[in-house]
Amino acid sequence: MADAREESALPVHSLRVGSVELLGETFSVVKAGGAEVVRAAGFGSPSSLAYSAFGRQAELLAVRELGDDDTALAAVHAYDDGDASLLDEVDVHQDGTELRRAMWRAARLVEPGTLASYGDVAAIAGHPRAARAAASACGACLVGLFVPVHRIVRASGKLAGHADDIAVRQALIDHERAMGMGR
């Protein structure tokens, strides 16, 4: 599992963005500068994802398109075709506390086609009493799919989040199960 460190300490002068189709919808990836580190990813426009990661600074940055051979976009294509293994090879970075970063690293360990509770993620991260912190970290995740927070559920087994978010998460889980991922 790749997880870039201290990327935010570097000045960001430009963004590289790209989009691919995933489950019939537009899935976008945002990288900063020349680094191969994904800083934001998800369903939606690259500009809205860039704003989520960089705030108003995103409006001032030069933007270039990612090439067709980009590793993150290739990983999303492979996932759409039923192979989730390349997602683990993509470097990601999100700003956050050490606890939040531990929760994101733990979430990356949940296998495709399976579900884990927020408490499970907290335990994997070494903080077994921090289920609420795990839920908060999942809700704040800006690199969805690469950090598969769609696989993380309440202790009851139910998905949490806003109605649109729940529908997307369920679609990703259904896709993984239909493609036989992780089993």
Image (spheres, grey):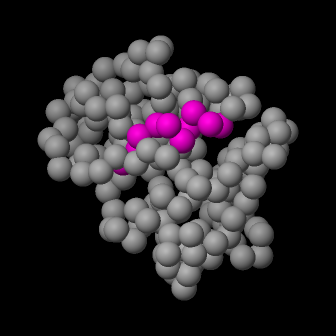
Magenta-span inclusion, residue 85: yes
Residue 162 visible somewhere in the drawing: yes
Residue at 25% across, 46% down: 7
- Find residue 161 and report its image quarter: bottom right
In this rendering, position of residue 29 left or right of residue 144: left
Q: Position of residue 97 (x, y in %)?
A: 33, 68
Magenta-span inclusion, residue 65: no
- Residue 134 vs residue 63, the one in the foreground: 134
In this rendering, position of residue 162 left or right of residue 181: left
- Residue 28 vs residue 111, the one in the foreground: 111
Q: Is residue 106 above or below residue 69?
A: below
Q: Is residue 6 above or below residue 27?
A: below
Q: Which residues are magenta?
A: 84-93
Q: Position of residue 84 (x, y in %)?
A: 65, 37
In this rendering, position of residue 49 left or right of residue 160: left
Residue at 69% across, 65% down: 116
Q: How many marks?
A: 0
Q: Position of residue 2 (x, y in %)?
A: 44, 44
